[in-house]
Amino acid sequence: MEYFVSLYGRFYSNRKKGRFIWQMAKLIGLLNKQYYTSRSVTLEESIEKTIKPEGSVELATKVIRGELTDKEELYLLCDNLWLGLNNLLEDIGIEYRDDILEL
């Protein structure tokens, strides 16, 4: 669980650095308890996994095809994936948010 929280933190901090979908693919592998064949096919294999957040297939497909010129569309795809991830984690019972700030 600690590794998951660490990966989720790295995933969140990388949202604006272009590594968003790579971190998501690693998270999908972790959620499915499966390894990828190699780094070069990680995105393709992540699409085939059973457990994945809504929006992951759409964004991964854009990245695989190299369709990265429409920044507004990419922003919307990333936002949709982020919402999908939050919904998936809630559905499977993983709590990663705190309502109380401890000082």
Image (cartoon, rainbow, N blue to C red):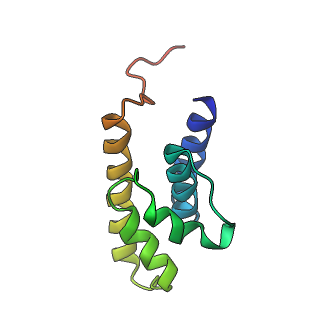
Does the rendering let one see residue 75? no
> Going 69% across and 67% down the picture, which residue do you hit?
38
Q: Please state which of residues 52 and 85 is positioned toward the viewer in this rendering.
A: 52
Does the rendering let one see residue 95? yes
State whether residue 21 is above or below residue 69. Answer: above
Q: Quadrant of residue 43?
A: bottom right
Quadrant housing the N terminus: top right
Kindly give the residue lying farthest to the right in the view shown.
38
> Going 45% across and 85% down the picture, which residue do you hit?
67
Q: Quadrant of residue 100?
A: top left
State whether residue 10 is above or below residue 19. Answer: above
Residue 19 picture location, percent across and down: 58, 63
Quadrant housing the C terminus: top right
Q: How many marks?
A: 0
Q: Please state which of residues 38 and 27 is positioned toward the viewer in this rendering.
A: 38
> Going 50% across and 47% down the picture, which residue do you hit?
32
> Going 53% across and 66% down the picture, which residue do you hit?
45
State whether residue 68 is above or below residue 20. Answer: below
Kindly give the residue lying farthest to the top in the view shown.
103
Residue 21 picture location, percent across and down: 51, 63
Residue 58 picture location, percent across and down: 36, 71
Q: Please state which of residues 58 and 100 is positioned toward the viewer in this rendering.
A: 58
In this rendering, position of residue 37 left or right of residue 61: right
